[in-house]
């Protein structure tokens, strides 16, 4: 994979330079209300988010609804403007002096959304939808439509049959294939998949996941795979980032995160996964209640209100992402955790929480 | 550990819910959709049956048919007994008495199922007043007890909340409280955990399991999620093209699926152990219910399909009561 990456003519910084560096990204949405529509509160959707994506990898992002997964995707695509922070794409800062423009960034970074129907224009045929972006970026009509037909067959849809159809004439799985084809029309290097398979039936979901794996290899892609489905993220990702209320609580290689989770939240999240084994059912609740409201989140560690290990330090100090306190991590692919409490980090597996009784 | 085998057969105990050869057809100008094509099942007290299927398999329509919630142009046939009383085709007032009383239902979207302009307390009390002829104050008190039962924190305050003031998990709990208001003997649950986060989903599944143990109701749980089915059911029936293609205990279905569709559904359910391997998928898409193929509806997607699959499909029943509707299963069971 890395060898193929090095030959990519679009590559600028070489294989060692991360494709995407996100530094202290922040987005707070104002909540307005009252008689004069003044700002009464702030939703801290994404707060000081930093991570990087390596060339050719799949980085999975997991977390409960409202944790800022989708806001992160929208910030990266600049569908919403960040309040602070910077995004660097293969060495070029996005929308900064001396960097690349948002338009140039979008040529290399594309996104697939969850709702396959609402993300397609109902009055455009499949071929028109796919050819739209290339045409907007200055490619001739004939070439753009040829490319659209080629992409349709790449995603497993016969162009003769589907190029002239409208969104309502396709099934959900077929529409999502078209959305993927459209995202690939500008030959991007990074594709953000925001819950791209969440709305599909299981048998169709598996087909689309296989397709994504094939396309990744064929087009030399890097994926940012956002999902609430922990099983799918484990299957797809090389590294995993866990978010809670707008902040990163843990990041690391997929085996480390799933086999030896260090943050109490990560452990509770994984323990909530249905077991698929009728003889080892879940008997205790890993977490109680819903995630707290991101309007005025708890001070210090945001998870402390639901954490069994919480101490006074957790309320006073914001934990930063760092190597686990027992130092067990890889320097090349670091496993980082944002937690103050050594016992919380050391607790192993689900057994430590008394969750599973085989 | 919860017992998940078939409850020991008690011949004297009549089933709480018995459905025989249920068919639902939507016939309107120019279209004829056969949504349910002969579904039969029965449920004892305290038992949970999961109807597992993908979208368009007819699972939700079956539940709505039981509750009499389908539009006028739906043609429903078959027989449904609730506690020995035949309920399909009852006149509207009699049906209204049953709904929310002896049989009640929870839905995927509590925001759409609850009334946005009444508080949770008012909605629960209303149901109790309608069914049991008690005064509002008593009903309100019962509502408070119900909110406690579904483990809503600070229930006195929540009683006065409108649905939009609650989180998704809380709303789902409130809807369960509403469904339990008149101690139903049968609870129909239509994808109640699908829209929830995993952390909340497991809480709701555990709550349903516990409530069922306390109240002894029979539960029909409809889902497309194999994981949720494995967590909650005693028995699983797999639906495809409006028919049950396989039924058995949770263990039988999860460990040793017989029907090619069930096998495909389980092998395309992703888990971490599959990393690095290509997923085995079922080719094609589910059938169009307006043009079902003759014989086995799964045959066009089935890799084991033979000529005999295009004619009437035999039902193979094993000694344990497991059922599979497949030509090829006859060979495997006989072998």
Image (cartoon, helix red, strand yellow):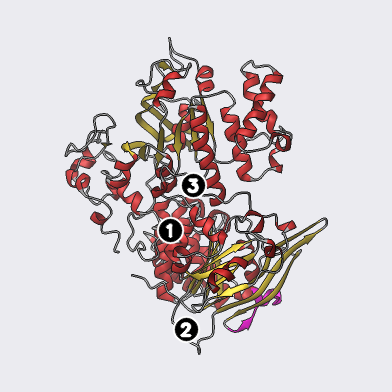
Find out whether residue B92 is within the magenta segment.
yes
**Badge 2 density bin: few <14, some 14–19, many ≥20, Cα 10 Å:** few
For this rendering, which residue is in front, A287 or A229? Answer: A229
Asked if one can make out residue A46 in the rendered structure from this viewpoint, the answer is yes
Find out whether residue A53 is within the magenta segment.
no
Please report whichever mark, 1 or 2, sits nearer to the chain's N-terminal start. 2
Give the percent coordinates (x, y) of residue A37.
Answer: 50, 34
- Taking the spot 72% from the left edge, 59% from the top edge, the residue there is B293
Secondary structure under tag 1 reads helix
Q: Which residue is mark 2?
A: B9
Please name which of the two marks, 3 or 2, marks the residue nearer to the observer. Answer: 3
Q: Find residue B124 and name its label.
A: none
Q: Which residue is mark 1?
A: B158
- Taking the spot 74% from the left edge, 57% from the top edge, the residue there is B290
Q: Which residues are magenta?
A: B84-95
Secondary structure under tag 3 reads loop
**Badge 3 density bin: few <14, some 14–19, many ≥20, Cα 10 Å:** many
Q: Is the C-beta separation of discs 3 and 2 under 8 Å?
A: no
Q: CA distance from mark 1 to mark 2?
A: 42 Å
């Amino acid at each position: 994979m890395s060898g193929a990456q090095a030959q990519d003519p679009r590559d600028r910084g070489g294989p060692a330079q991360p494709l995407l560096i996100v530094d202290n990204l922040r987005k707070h949405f104002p909540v307005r209300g009252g008689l004069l529509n003044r700002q009464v509160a702030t939703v801290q959707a994404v707060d000081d988010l930093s991570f990087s994506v390596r060339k050719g990898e799949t980085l999975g992002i997991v977390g409960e609804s409202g944790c800022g997964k989708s806001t992160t995707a929208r910030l990266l695509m600049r569908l919403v403007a960040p309040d602070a922070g910077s995004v660097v794409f293969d060495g070029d800062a996005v929308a900064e002096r001396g960097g690349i423009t948002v338009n140039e960034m979008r040529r290399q970074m594309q996104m697939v959304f969850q709702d396959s129907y609402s993300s397609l224009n109902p009055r455009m045929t499949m071929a028109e939808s796919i050819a739209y972006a290339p045409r907007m970026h200055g490619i001739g009509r004939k070439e753009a439509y040829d490319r659209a037909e080629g992409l349709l067959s790449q995603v497993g849809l016969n162009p003769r049959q589907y190029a002239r159809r409208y969104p309502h004439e396709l099934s959900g799985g077929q529409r999502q294939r078209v959305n993927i084809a459209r995202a690939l029309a500008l030959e991007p290097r990074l594709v953000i998949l925001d819950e791209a398979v969440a709305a599909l039936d299981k048998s169709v979901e598996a087909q689309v996941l296989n397709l994504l794996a094939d396309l990744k290899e064929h087009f030399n892609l890097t994926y940012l795979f956002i999902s609430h489905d922990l099983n799918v993220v484990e299957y797809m990702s090389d590294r995993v980032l866990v978010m809670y209320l707008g902040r990163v609580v843990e990041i690391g290689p997929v085996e480390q995160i799933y086999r030896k989770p260090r943050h109490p939240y990560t452990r509770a999240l994984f323990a909530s996964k249905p077991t698929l084994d009728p003889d080892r059912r879940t008997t205790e609740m890993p977490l109680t209640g819903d995630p707290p409201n991101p309007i005025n989140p708890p001070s210090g560690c945001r998870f402390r209100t639901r954490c069994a290990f919480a101490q006074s330090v957790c309320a006073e100090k914001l934990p930063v992402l760092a190597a686990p306190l027992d130092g067990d991590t890889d320097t090349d692919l670091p496993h980082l955790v944002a937690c103050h409490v050594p016992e919380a980090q050391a607790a192993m597996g689900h057994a430590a929480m008394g969750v599973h009784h085989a | 550990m919860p017992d998940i085998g078939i409850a020991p057969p008690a011949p004297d105990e009549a089933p709480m819910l018995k459905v025989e050869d249920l068919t639902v057809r939507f016939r309107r100008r120019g279209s004829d959709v056969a949504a349910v094509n002969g579904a039969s099942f029965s449920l004892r007290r305290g038992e949970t049956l999961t109807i597992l299927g993908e979208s368009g398999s007819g699972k939700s329509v079956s539940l709505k048919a039981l509750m009499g919630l389908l539009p006028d142009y739906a043609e429903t046939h078959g027989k449904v007994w609730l506690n020995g009383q035949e309920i399909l085709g009852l006149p509207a007032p009699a049906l209204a008495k049953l709904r929310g009383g002896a049989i009640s239902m929870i839905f995927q979207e509590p925001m759409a199922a609850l009334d946005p302009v009444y508080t949770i307390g008012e909605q629960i009390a209303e149901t109790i007043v309608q069914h049991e002829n008690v005064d509002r104050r008593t009903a309100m008190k019962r509502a408070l007890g119900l909110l406690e039962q579904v483990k809503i924190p600070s229930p006195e305050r929540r009683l006065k909340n409108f649905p939009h003031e609650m989180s998704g998990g809380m709303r789902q709990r409130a809807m369960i409280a509403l469904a339990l208001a008149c101690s139903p003997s049968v609870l129909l649950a239509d994808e109640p955990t699908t829209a929830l986060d995993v952390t909340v989903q497991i809480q709701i599944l555990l709550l349903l399991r516990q409530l069922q143990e306390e109240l002894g109701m029979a539960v029909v749980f409809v889902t497309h999620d194999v994981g949720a089915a494995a967590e909650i059911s005693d028995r699983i029936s797999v639906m495809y093209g409006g028919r049950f293609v396989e039924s058995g205990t949770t263990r039988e279905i999860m460990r040793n699926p017989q029907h090619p569709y069930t096998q495909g559904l389980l092998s395309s359910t992703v888990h971490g152990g599959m990393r690095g391997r290509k997923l085995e998928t079922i080719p094609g898409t589910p059938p169009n219910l307006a043009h079902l193929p003759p014989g086995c509806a799964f045959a066009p997607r089935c890799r084991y399909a033979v000529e005999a699959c295009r004619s009437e499909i035999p039902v193979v029943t094993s000694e344990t009561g497991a059922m599979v509707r497949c030509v090829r299963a006859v060979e495997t069971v006989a072998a």
